[in-house]
Image (cartoon, grey):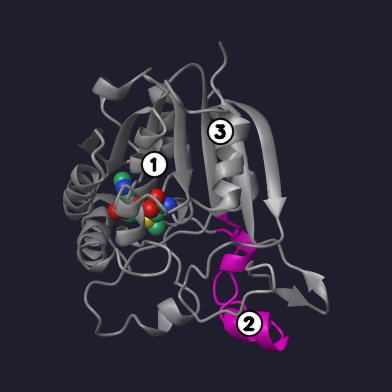
Amino acid sequence: MAGSEPARTEVNRAVWDGWAAAAGTDAHYDAAALVAGTWRRTEVEQAAVELAVGDVAGRAVCHLQCHLGFDAIEFARSGAQTVGVDFSPVALARAAELAVRCGVTVDLVEADATALPATLHGRFDLVYATFGVLPWIDDVDSWMVSVASVLGSRGALALVEHHPVLSMVANLAAVTTGGARPVFGRPYQADGPVRRAGRAAAAEPGAGPVPVVYAHGLGRVVTAAVRAGLVVDHLVEHFDSPLDWRGEGLVADGDGRFRARVDGQLLPASFTLVARRPG
Ligand SMILES: C[S@@+](CC[C@H](N)C(=O)[O-])C[C@H]1O[C@@H](n2cnc3c(N)ncnc32)[C@H](O)[C@@H]1O
């Protein structure tokens, strides 16, 4: 896992180009549902949008690390002027094709999230970044400064992310389904790359370039937002998650949410941060 930051970014771009080429037909990224207009972002993501800006109609929205652009397309459908940003050209090409099939206009920009281009600066009412964005970022301070640079006055970041505590757990399926004791496969926070946990770690050897991922605790994330000049409106920890994000075959509770309990006590599963650029 050694290497300079640009080299690691290149590795991750190659990884994401490969994943983006294959994505779009699973339960979460269901392109047919998106085109049919029946795909919906998760409730916790929608709640973050409402906390940040309320209705997006007429707003300028940046979907950051947009992958196939599902949310960007939905924002455009809801009347927002939408830009999707990602560093993967393959993901952006897929997003462009989906936008055409959905009959909406989304501007797509290839850029590193930690260095968003000057053409985007000061433009957005909302930067929306959710589930699986920060694990790919080495320097969260730079990421937050970059996000702050593209927000307009009173514009807000809506960040929804997997909780760093749950990301530590290597045997998540056994913990969520069988009440097994957790095995911690990686630290809560680290400087530099960490091992991936769970099924994702097991799948690594021999399966193409090894993704380089990072672990950031909640304190680091919130402090980065404050250092970047943002004012924290909401920091909410959720004790469930709408996603089986490592694809481990987790069993959802009756309400469709995934929870991990240790000795009957819920572990934090995800969090929402809404932080605003002052007027
Ligand atoms: C787990 S996906 C995000 C999924 C997202 N919730 C969505 O809307 O579909 C992570 C995304 O981050 C992108 N990414 C990773 N590192 C990046 C970076 N340094 N700059 C820009 N995009 C990056 C990947 O290409 C990928 O599309």
Dot 2 and dot 3 residues touching (CB under 8 Å) = no
Q: Quadrant of residue 11?
A: bottom left
Tell me if I can see residue 238 in this picture. yes
Q: Residue 80 magenta-drawn?
A: no
Answer above or below: position of 251 versus 273.
below
State how far apart marks 3 and 1 are (Cα).
26 Å
Q: Secondary structure at mark 3?
A: helix
Q: Residue 188 magenta-drawn?
A: yes
Q: Nearer the viewer, residue 110 or 112?
A: 110
Q: Which residue is mark 3?
A: 225
Seen at 35% across and 64% down, the residue is 212
State how far apart marks 2 and 3 are (Cα).
31 Å
- Judge left or right: residue 257 versus residue 53: right
Q: Is mark 1 within 8 Å of ligand 1?
A: no
Q: Nearer the viewer, residue 6 or 256?
A: 256
Answer above or below: position of 98 versus 179.
above
Tell me if I can see residue 137 in this picture. no
Q: Which residues are magenta?
A: 162-189
Q: Is mark 2 within 8 Å of ligand 1?
A: no
- Which numbered circle lies on residue 183? 2
Q: Which residue is mark 1?
A: 74
Label located before the other in sequence (3 or 1): 1
- Judge left or right: residue 189 versus residue 181: left
- Name the kind of residue labelled 1 in the image: Glu
Seen at 31% across and 68% down, the residue is 25
State how far apart marks 2 and 1 are (Cα).
38 Å
Q: Quadrant of residue 24?
A: bottom left
The image shows residue 278 at horizontal and vertical percentages of 57, 15
What is the tally of numbered marks visible in this picture? 3
Q: Nearer the viewer, mark 2 or mark 1?
A: 1
Label located before the other in sequence (2 or 1): 1
The image shows residue 33 at horizontal and vertical percentages of 36, 58
